[in-house]
Each structure stands twice: as structure tokens, then as C-alpha cells.
Amino acid sequence: MTTVRYAPSPTGRLHLGNARPALINWLFAKARSGTYVLRLDDTDTARSTEEFARGIVADLDWLGIVPDLKVRQSDRTALYDHARDRLIAAGRLYPAFETEEELEIKRGRARLLGRPPVYDRAALTLTEAQKARYEAEGRQPHWRFRLDGKPVHFDDLIKGPQIVNTASMSDPVLIRADGSYLYTLPSVVDDIDLGITHVIRGEDHVSNTGTQIEIFEALGGAVPFFAHHNLLTGAEGEGLSKRIGSLSLLELREAGYEPMAVAIMAVLTGTSLPVEPYADLTSLGQALDLDAISHGPARFDPAELDSLNARILHQMPYDVAKPRLAAIGRASEPLWLALRGNLRRFSDIAELAQLIDGAVVPVVAAEDAAFLVLARDLLPPEPWDETTWSTWTTLVKEKSGRKGKELFMPLRLALTGRHDGPELRSLLPLLGRKASLARLS
Ligand code: GLU
């Protein structure tokens, strides 16, 4: 049974870059009838808010993700305390009393000596008396995980075989001096407790994985599979920041983008699959394979989002559009089919529909006036359908001797008041004979 988790910190709204792991996990789980857990990593109480937590759920919902289970780390401290005690008893978690300034001095010294600024483990050699003295001075310890020093190997489902050399890393701090947990330990404890089978996340977490695998093993938990995907960047390769909110999902939504367009861009950018419309997340999930995710950068191109959004609308079946059309009083299949090909955003439909029954001001050049009278008099009798345009214009062509642009542009300008727009073949039957007569006159 596949179980995945998406684990954002509720310290901002989600942006496009966050949508990538959110969706890749979702598609992976749903393609395997698995379970999707939304885990809010809210141990940083100073920056996590209830409002951001609600915002994340709303952003996921907009994308079409409805988690099977929601948990938040702030509710699960007892589990972390239990794991902490076990690691202390096993000698893998040790108290350290250095202040930030003392650590900075140590790092500076290491740099001067040309050594990597790795923590020297001085705290491991403290005697009980020294520890008692620090505590008597009012120093609270922070707690470090004692790394094994052996290279950690794992087979990444995207990046292939990986080796993390924990010998060149500082023993990571798992618990701050105020007793609060950093992300690393709670994440492993939750992954064990929730039976996570696959950890799919950004490649900025590869080196954490070395530490986390050691913690899984120290706690006797089953080590899940790991898959680290490339991170979405801006066109210049710059990172997308959640806190700055660049391209937040909320902004994209308010700008009128289709959630499927955003989802497809978030998932398929930086893969070997072409960016093209998919009807829904299920079909996108069938196409996506972790192997398709490239090892190079994933550069997001806003122009590609615009064109994908338009293509999705141009192909959108009436059934799908109907409820949204009904909401603006425009639920008509012929109208949708006539106009969808000219949409950039769904909301454009309201303005385009004005071409049919709004106050269109026909544009008539002086030299076309006689031609338009001739054309008007040749309008066929109703009923009209998609063939009417060609029947009519064939006749107008014959009688007027005009062809091509000379023939079509004056008709379009008179009928719609614009140089471009929906195909007249589809628009004409919607206009009907009466309105067409009036505009040609
Ligand atoms: N809260 C972590 C993050 O947002 C989760 C990383 C993970 O998936 O383990 O980076």
C-alpha cells in the first residue's frame, strides 16, 4: 500500500514551486490507489499561522488535491518526545551547550586552518560535572544527533544511486535550546508513524536524507523510498520564494488561470514530457512517471503557462464549461463552441458574448458601403446553421467579384465591429438573420 505525504510549513501561501511536490506526490499516490497525507510542518511556532494553514488547504483544493489525511506536527509533540528519549538512551542524541557566538568562533577558526567548518563534537567529551555547571549557569542545552560517519547509500527513484557522506557534516541539531524541535526528527518520526512508503520532495533535501536515514535506522523504522525532484525556478534560474509569494497559487487563481494549466506547468516543467493539455489530474498522473523528471533545472516560462491555459480552454468540452457558463447566464452549447477558440482566460467569454447580443458598432468603410448592401440582400432565409456562412459568402463572391480579404474583412467588420474574433461560420447562426441584416445595414 503506497502512502505519501506532502509536508509544507504553514509560513506562507503556496507558490508554483510548492505545487510541484504537492502534485507529484498526489499523482504518484492516486496512480497506485494509495494514501495522500497532508502534514503541516508547524514546529516553527513563530512563523506558522492558522491562516496560512487554511490557505494551503484552499490552494490544494483549487488544484484538485483533497488529502486523505491531515496532520499537524504541533499536535504530535508526545511522539517526538518519545523518540527523543529513545535516541538519548541509545547514545545518539547528546546535549551541547555552545552559544551561537561560540560556534561562530569555532567555525572561523576551522576556516583559518583550511578545515571544513564541521562541529568538533566537543560536547561529547563533557563530564557530568561540566554539564551540571553549565546548567547551574542557566545554560540550556541544544541537542545534536551523533552521525555514524559512514557514507549513507540510497537509491533515489529520480536521481539514481546517491551517497551522502555524513562524515563531512556537522552533527545536526535536532532540538533547540528552548526545547522546540527542528524539522528533521519530527519528519522521520511522522514518516515512521504514518507508514510513509515514498518520500517525494525537492532535491534541496538530498543531504538531509543521509541524516534522516540514520535516524530511521536508529529508531528501528522502515526506511521509505526517496525521490528527489528538480526545483522549479524562474526564467533566469532564480528560486521561487514562498514568503515573497512570487507566483503564488492565489495570485495565479485571481489572474484567472485554469487550475489544470497551473498543475500541468508545475508538474511537467523540467520533465521529458511535452507541456500540453490534459483533461484532468487522473490523465496527467497516467502520463507521469518519476523517470520522466529530468536531472537538469526546471525553468518556468510564464508565456508557456499563457499558451497552455488558452489551449485548455480551446479544447474544453461544453459539459465541463457548462456550470461556469450557467453562473454568468450563458449556458449555451453553440455559444461555447463558437467562442471558446478565442479565449485566453475563461472570463473573456463575457466580453466575447457581447459580439452576439451586445451593442456592437458595425465598422463600415465608405468604399465598402455598396458591397455590404449587396451582401445584405443575399443573406439566405433561416433556419441557419454552420453551413450558412459558406453558402452566403459563395453567393456574395459570385455577385460582387470580390475574394479573399476584400470579401471577408468588410463582412467581419460590419458584423462584429472588429478585425479579429471568433469564426464567422459559428458566429453567424448565433447572430441570426435579423441582427445580421441590421449590422450590414
Ligand atoms: N517542511 C519541509 C519542507 O517544506 C518538508 C520536507 C520534506 O518533505 O521532508 O521543506
Image (cartoon, rainbow, N blue to C red):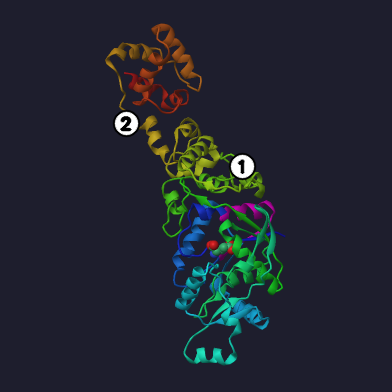
Q: Mark 1 against mark 2, which lies toward the viewer?
A: 1
* Cα–Cα gap, marks 1 and 2: 48 Å
Q: Is residue 187 magenta?
A: no
**Occupied quadrant, residue 37:** bottom right
Question: Where in the figure is residue 238, as x and y percent of width and height?
Answer: 46, 51
Residue 65 visible somewhere in the drawing: no
Left or right, 164 with respect to 116, comes to right
The amino acid on which the numbered mark 2 sits, given as a three-letter code, is Ala
Please state if 209 lies on the left or on the right of 371 as rendered. right
- Which one is earlier in the sequence, the residue at label 1 or at label 2? 1
Q: Nearer the viewer, residue 142 or 332?
A: 142
Ligand 1 image position (quadrant): bottom right
Query: Is residue 52 visible to the viewer in this orientation of the structure?
Result: yes
Which numbered disc covers residue 272?
1
Can residue 25 be found in the magenta stretch? yes
Residue furthest to the front in view is 113
* Residue at the left extreme, as displayed: 366
Q: Which residues are magenta?
A: 21-39
SS label for mark 2: loop
Q: Which residue is mark 2?
A: 359
Residue 126 shows which numbered tag? none
Q: Are marks 1 and 2 in contact (CB under 8 Å)?
A: no
User: Percent from the top left, x then y, of residue 337?
Assistant: 50, 32
Q: Is residue 400 above or below residue 92?
A: above
> How many residues crowd mark 2 within 10 Å: few (<14), some (14–19), many (20+)?
few
Residue 94: x percent and y percent? 60, 81
